[in-house]
Amino acid sequence: MEYKTTLNLPQTDFPMRANLPQREPEILRYWEEIGLYKRIQEQSKGKPKYILHDGPPYANGNIHLGHTLNKTLKDIVVKYKTMAGYDAPYVPGWDTHGLPIEQQAIKTLGVDRHRVPPAEFRRICREYALKYVDIQREEFKRLGVQGDWDHPYLTLQPTYEAVQIGIFGEMAKRGYIYKGMKPVYWCTDCETALAEAEVEYHENESDSIYVLFPIRDGKGLINVDEKTYVLIWTTTPWTIPGNQAISLHPDYRYVLAEVDGRRVIVAEELLRQVAEIKGETHPPILGTWQGRELEGIRCAHPFYDRDSLLILGEHVTLEQGTGAVHTAPAHGTEDFEVCQKYGIPVLSLVDGSGRYLPEAGIFAGEVIWESNQKVIAELERRGLLYHKSKIVHQYPHCWRCKEPLMFRATEQWFASIDGFRKEALKAIEGVRWIPAWGEERIRNMVAERGDWCISRQRVWGVPIPIFYCEDCQATIISDETIGWLQKLFAEHGSDVWFERSAPELLPPAFKCPSCGGTNFRKETDTMDVWFDSGSSHMAVLEQRPELRWPADLYLEGSDQHRGWFNSSLCTSVAVRGVAPYKAVLTHGFVVDEEGRKMSKSLGNVIYPQDLINRYGADVLRLWVTSADYRNDMAVSLNIMKQLAEAYRKIRNTFRFLLGNLYDFDPEKGSLPYEQLSLLDKWILFRLHQLIQRVTRAYEDSEFHIVYHAISTFCVVDMSSFYLDITKDTLYCGAAESKERRGIQTVLYEVANVLVRLLAPVLCFTAEEIWSFLPGARERAASVHLAGWPQVNRRYLDPELEKIWGKILSLRDQVSRALELARQEKLIGPSTEAGVSLYPEEEETLRFLRRVEQDLPALFIVSAVKIHEVWEAAPAGAVPAEDDWSLKIVIRKAPGKKCVRCWLYRESVGEFSDHPDLCERCYEVVRQQPGGGPD
């Protein structure tokens, strides 16, 4: 007889090979068919709200792995909160204005923005942005991210723009908005001002020069008959034409010394460093003063017939240079501020494209970045170059075009951070920051940041809603004008600003509040895109009925401390007085296996679409949880291969579970807890411990713990332990036996719990498993509509934990003895073994008797014999360790090998009709059709 047919071998259509790239789109179609997101929202009505507010990505290209990390983390949070009993709607958004989209539209479509009418250029930008909203939407959906994809928020939506100018108007009303001349970061390539959040720092090689400024009025302290100089140092030679002063620290000591045959003034502490450049170590000192004594001395500008005044500034340091700081107020914030104190007017010699103006004389028309060598050559020709070299340092670059930036003094609109800085710092204290260091980071940024430059010299953006009276030049912004514009914007969008004249944008019969005039012009600048996205807490959370303000969570990359977190905080505190979020979670950046940033120049860029096509989205989602996202996340094909293997082990665990439930109906076949074996109860104990640990990890946003805890349970607790031990009963026992039904009861509970614990992470695979789990689809059409597993306190029996602590310790001792026997060629597989246990104390004997029935299965051996305490162990017995009063003897198991279960039994050979079967297998086979006489 072919006994294989009598075994209860696993049966399931759940495939061993995942084929995720093909299977996942089918699951996406199923979710669409059942209207999953809508059903989730209907089912969640009336439950406590949990709002994760989506920070909007730019709609200007395909998604990258940074997007993948961010959106998957958000999706995990929302899916978990939904299953845990919250109403957690997710409204995705996109940032659709600004330089990134302008540049891509110009580059892709070959548009010259200077030759295209503003309304036409805006139409081109809008079409470009909406195209990539559609592309990114489909890419995010392919990742398994659930949300209201049919109704996202876009910063170009008319209702959004109307709220945004309302926020601007309220800030202006409170006195937080002003126009002023200040040096701001300026991109000569993009021809616009930038905010600090739009600046990146990269290593740059720059010219380092020391320049001699001849003293022309020594204020009676210095004899100008003998040529004397103040020595300065700079790494931006192109700013020398803009020099208007030299700053000294009031408290530092300065010396007049003779170096290289010239009389120079430098800080005393830096004299040696300056002299060593010329190979000198102890130059003679001719005079000493404190900085404040030298205030008012006049130097001659190296190129022009104008003075360069010695002034005092606390910003001067002794870290490098000469202690005398070249001061060009048009090209530096500190330069500007110190010159303001002295009433020195700002002289700007550079235009928006980075060329010198005619007033720059010999440098007129030159591009500043190309003029350094000309400036150096001219200094050298005039005998005013003390030294030149190269220096590598961090230099600001534009976040979009990657070109170097300059500081340029221009008239811009600003938000006064000082107006609400204290309130912002207080608001930060009321927010939960994950990780905790995020609080100090944003606190320092808010404490130290200057006023926010919110104007941009661009067309594709929300206009700054300000008018000017042509008759009296008054600036006009009021509740009346803002309210009227909000109605226009809500109906027509901000395009109306570019399509209509100023009078057409103002309320009917409007007159200038200052002079009664009726001639107006409108502001031409647009708002910083960070003001756009920073308005989302009111433009979205307060406008959508399913959402609420403030958000429970903002979740973005750590660069957003100076970006979206910061701009949202500023607009919210300025208008509402509190932060727009209760908690802020930040993640690291995506890097390669060596920790390097992904870049095309390094050739280490990996695209999410390629990984999805190769491994499936679920393996990519598993990557997101595989390491602590609070640090940078490494990715490579090697890492993905390892995760694909980890995924395979999890999938195989489920395949085993499902395969052994083919003849199990949980409604009819489940055994009550008290009828389960000690082993069954132990796995339920471990499973419900897992529920506790995983739930806590989700609540604490420690998703790497979720992954590792579930993976360890699948591999260690299940595959290597419980499933290994129970295979004999599952396959060889009677199909309807109490022992087998007990194991199936546990397997069903494990599968039913595990699939839900994994659903927020492996959302596709969990859905696939749910469709194969007996009775699951009848309870819920999707695993994502199922409730979160709850801990059964009865299963967490502390006495059971004590017993199993000892059992597992005993199992380790026996496994060690089995391995020794295997090395001595006494046995092959452990099923050939019979184990004899010789307790040396009554307490040990009592414990062994208590668990005696479970020991053969636990040890995976054919026989276990427990001897009395008074029986002496034979020579060669293996003494147990770890405080066990016990000796272990391994022998060949008595009896013959049963061909059906492969265990050795003395009953094999007793049955003439089935002489190769043991008693257990004989009884099972007899009950089956054709198994033998009744």
Image (cartoon, grey):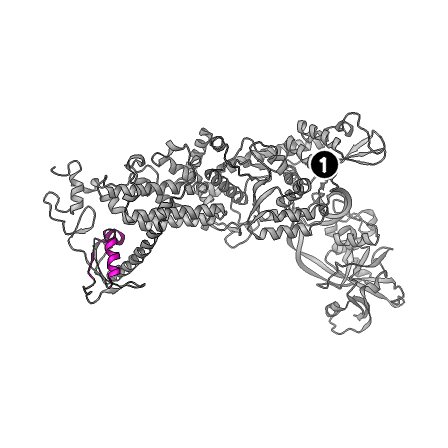
Q: Can I make out residue 402 in this image?
A: no
Residue 577 against residue 842 in the figure, above or below? above
Q: Residue furthest top?
A: 508
Nearest the camera: 590 or 384? 590
Q: Residue 91 lies in what quarter of the image? A: top right
Q: What element carries label 1?
A: helix
Pick whichever, 620 or 76, lies toward us.
76
The residue located at (67%, 54%) in the rendering is 395
Q: For this view, does 608 lie left or right of residue 904?
A: right
Which SS type dominates the magenta stretch?
helix
Q: Does the magenta stretch include residue 116?
A: no
**Image quadrant in which you'd find residue 522:** top right
x and y, in percent, of residue 520 in the image: 81, 31
Q: Name the residue under label 1.
A: 169
Q: Quadrant of residue 238?
A: bottom right
**Residue at position x 31%, y 38% in the image:** 12
Q: What segment carries the magenta color?
A: 841-868
Q: Which of 905 and 319 is in front in this view?
A: 905
Taking the image as shown, residue 471 lies to the left or right of residue 726, namely right
Looking at the picture, how far across and down is residue 191, in whole percent?
72, 43
Asked whether, in this view, residue 861 is left or right of residue 803, the answer is left
Quadrant for the C terminus in the image: top left
Percent coordinates x, y for residue 57 in the rendering: 59, 40
Quadrant location, the N terminus = top left
Where 486 falls versus 236 (above or below)?
above
Q: Report if residue 150 is visible in the image.
A: yes
